[in-house]
Image (cartoon, grey):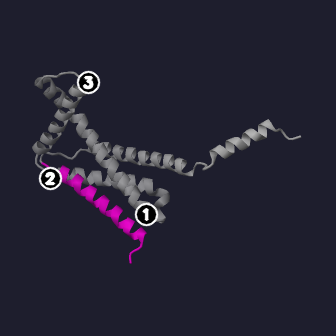
């Protein structure tokens, strides 16, 4: 029977590989297809903004906003992809005792290395290009993901390890102050 730790290791590794495959699939789209997907998404964002804030934009305004937002939305998507990849790599590495002290660094390095190979991959896709600035954007996303994971871990530990009986401590402290030693 396989121990739980080995199962967790395999599950995290499968999650990392699956996420890398998803990134690869997005990067393997021809430029025209990729622009259609992101254009559709930014159009839906513009529609949502118009509806939520009662802006009542006409079709022309929706299209203008979608086109204006397409580049930032694409870059934010890149950052998000690599933030998630870095978090998955970090979770995978935390399953092993040795690299724990440098797991954050290795997760960032792994995500950044994958971003670099992804940009090389895009050199061979019709209408796409490999850009160093995209590697930097992806790497920044990885840092943000790791920092978010670290922050959530710190908050979680504080919530889990806080004193169980704060009521007793407060009443004990009050009794000491109201009855000073003689």
Label 1 and label 3: CA atoms lie apart by 45 Å
Q: Is mark 2 on a helix, strand or loop?
A: loop
3 or 2: tag closer to the N-terminus: 3
User: From the viewer's perspective, is 68 left or right of 143?
Assistant: left
Mark toward the viewer: 1 or 3:
3
Magenta includes 181?
no
Label 3 and label 2: CA atoms lie apart by 42 Å
Residue at 34%, 44% in the rendered image:
141
> What is the residue that sits farthest to the right in this orientation?
182
| Residue at which label 2 appears | 124
Query: The N terminus appears in which quarter of the rendering?
Result: bottom left
Mark toward the viewer: 1 or 2:
1
x then y, percent, for residue 129: 18, 45
Mark 1: give few (<14), some (14-19) or many (20+) Cα within 10 Å. Answer: some
1 or 3: tag closer to the N-terminus: 3
Magenta includes 19?
yes
| Residue at which label 3 appears | 53
| Residue at which label 1 appears | 95
- Observer-nearest of 105 and 167: 167
CB within 8 Å, label 3 to label 2: no
Please tell me in which quadrant of the rendered image residue 180 appears.
Answer: top right
Q: Give the range drawn in magenta.
A: 1-29
Mark 3: give few (<14), some (14-19) or many (20+) Cα within 10 Å. Answer: few
Most common SS among magenta residues: helix
Residue at 86%, 41% in the rendered image:
181
Mark 2: give few (<14), some (14-19) or many (20+) Cα within 10 Å. Answer: few
1 or 2: tag closer to the N-terminus: 1
x then y, percent, for residue 52: 25, 27
x then y, percent, for residue 19: 27, 55
């Amino acid at each position: 029977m396989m121990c739980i730790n080995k199962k967790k290791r395999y599950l995290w590794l499968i999650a990392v590989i699956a996420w890398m495959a998803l990134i690869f699939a997005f990067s393997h789209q021809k430029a025209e297809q990729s622009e259609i997907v992101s254009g559709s998404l930014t159009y839906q964002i513009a529609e949502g903004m118009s509806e939520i804030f009662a802006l009542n934009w006409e079709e022309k305004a929706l299209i203008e906003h979608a086109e204006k937002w397409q580049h930032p939305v694409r870059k934010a998507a890149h950052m998000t992809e690599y933030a998630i990849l870095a978090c998955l790599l970090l979770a995978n590495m935390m399953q092993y005792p040795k690299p724990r002290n440098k797991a954050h660094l290795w997760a960032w390095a792994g995500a950044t290395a994958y971003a670099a190979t992804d940009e090389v991959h895009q050199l061979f896709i019709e209408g796409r290009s490999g850009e160093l600035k995209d590697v930097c954007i992806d790497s920044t996303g990885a840092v943000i993901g790791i920092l978010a994971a670290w922050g959530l871990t710190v908050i979680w530990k504080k919530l889990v390890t806080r004193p169980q009986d704060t009521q007793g401590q407060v009443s004990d402290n009050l009794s000491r102050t109201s009855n000073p030693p003689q």
